[in-house]
Amino acid sequence: MASNRLYDAMPVMVQNLGCTWAGYQRTRARFSNHFYKVLAEWRKTELLPQEELLEVQKRRLFRLIDLARESVPYYRGLEAPVDSSDPSEAIAQTLASIPVLDKDGYRNNFESIINPAIPVSRIRQSRTSGTTGSALRLAHSPEAIAEEYATVWRMRMSHGVNLRDAHLTFGGQLIVPFSRSGTPFWRYNYFNRQTLFSVHHMTPANLVHYVDEIHRTGATYVWGYPSSLNLVARSMLELGRGIPRGKFGAVFTSSESLLAFQRDAIEEAFGAPVLDRYGTSEFAVSMTECLEGNLHVDMEYCIVEVEVDEETEEYERGGLIVTGLSNDVTPFLRYRIGDVGTRLKSPCPCGRAGDVFRDVDGRNEDYVVTPDGRLVGRLDHIFKEQSMILEAQILQDTPRAIDVKIVPAPGYAQADEAKMIREIRLRLGDEIHIDVHVVSSIPRERNGKFRAVKSHLGRVAA
Ligand SMILES: [Zn+2]
């Protein structure tokens, strides 16, 4: 709502009212009667044993397939569901007859995947953020939005957080104009008791003010992008101004891969556990983390299959194929979402039934191209072990060279740069030219997300 010039020109107080109005509108769209009904239902089904949970999942899959066969042109030829007394068998057999839908297939058939039985007035359209590749058109019913938020709030409530609690957010909205150079770097949504921090103004000097404001608010939980929360957390720890344990109930992260070092810094600074969630803008998959550190598939909301590349006795790992059980407007049946996950073969010690993943990695990022033409991904892992580097970004315009921007931690020395270059060379070889630039901050994308790799050559279609 806030990325326009009119908003930017308003006084801060009026922007606060704008954020409050937007919060009110969001609340109306997300927290409908349907939301409360489903949330109450799913808070009960969460506790079901495996067999009964699969029974719920099976019923929801069959309902969606019947609806898709009946009204969605793209799915007209689909076979009827195959029932069995064993729900996991019924689900597996039913899915086996459905071809996988990849992103190109979805993009090219969008018009025939939209369910014409749903009145246009009930359809909410949006797009994927499209930081890489071209954006996808998306369409949802109000019920799909409500059910997505039911998974979010089921997780939050199971950690003692309630809908009306005061909170802090560090997300993508452009709530503070880019050009602004003085405080405040946050705005208030009075309706939801939310303090929205800008993720576009996080320089070391500005972060001191963020830390003051975090201490000033009476918030009890935090939500944000891992990359932004990590910066704030590092600043809190450096200033010796971490939050004592017990003030915040939890820190919830989503939208980017949460790296181990980010989690450690955030938990220490906020004195609360970090709980991650995996979801996507297609509203076709949701996984929520438990205190054991595992991601539980929200079984009422989706089915997740793995295209296994790697398997051991403990886990299987590979690309994810998701079936969303809530979106009746554009049913995603066996959709190749483009992320990779590690599914555990034994149940989670926390006692919650259903499928459990140890991790999910987003593939939604660019690759670096080496001079000999190799595409190399997941380069953000290089910086995992580099404790003297706060943030880093790799830029590439030609296969012969990369530029590496780094924000150093206090005490950063030449030896740290040498160590980082060794790590890069391990993955990209000795031939590529590497230029290191020490900077005080790295700009976010327009959507507030951090991109570890930006290449004009190795762009991945999202
Ligand atoms: Zn668990």
Image (cartoon, rainbow, N blue to C red):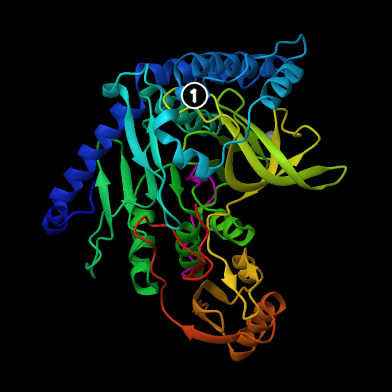
Say which residue label 1 marks. 326
| Residue at (59% x, 73% y) in the render | 369
Residue 124 at least partly seen: yes
Seen from the viewer's position, the closer of residues 384 and 235 is 384
Give coordinates of residue 265: x percent, y percent. 57, 60
Q: Is mark 1 within 8 Å of ligand 1?
A: no
Give coordinates of residue 118: x percent, y percent. 35, 18
In the displayed orientation, state which residue is furthest to the front: 77
| Residue at (54% x, 13% y) in the render | 66
Q: For this view, does 118 lie left or right of residue 56?
A: left
Above/below status of 261 relative to 91: below
Give coordinates of residue 65: x percent, y percent. 56, 18
Above/below status of 31 relative to 407: above
Q: Main secondary structure of the magenta part?
A: loop
Seen from the viewer's position, the closer of residues 73 and 28 is 73
Seen from the viewer's position, the closer of residues 334 and 305 is 334
Residue 411 at least partly seen: no
Seen from the viewer's position, the closer of residues 170 and 420 is 420
- Quadrant of ligand 1: it is top right
Q: Quadrant of residue 48?
A: top right
Q: Secondary structure at mark 1?
A: loop
Disc 1 marks a residue whose amino acid type is: Ser
Residues in magenta, as a range: 239-254
Q: Quadrant of residue 388?
A: bottom right
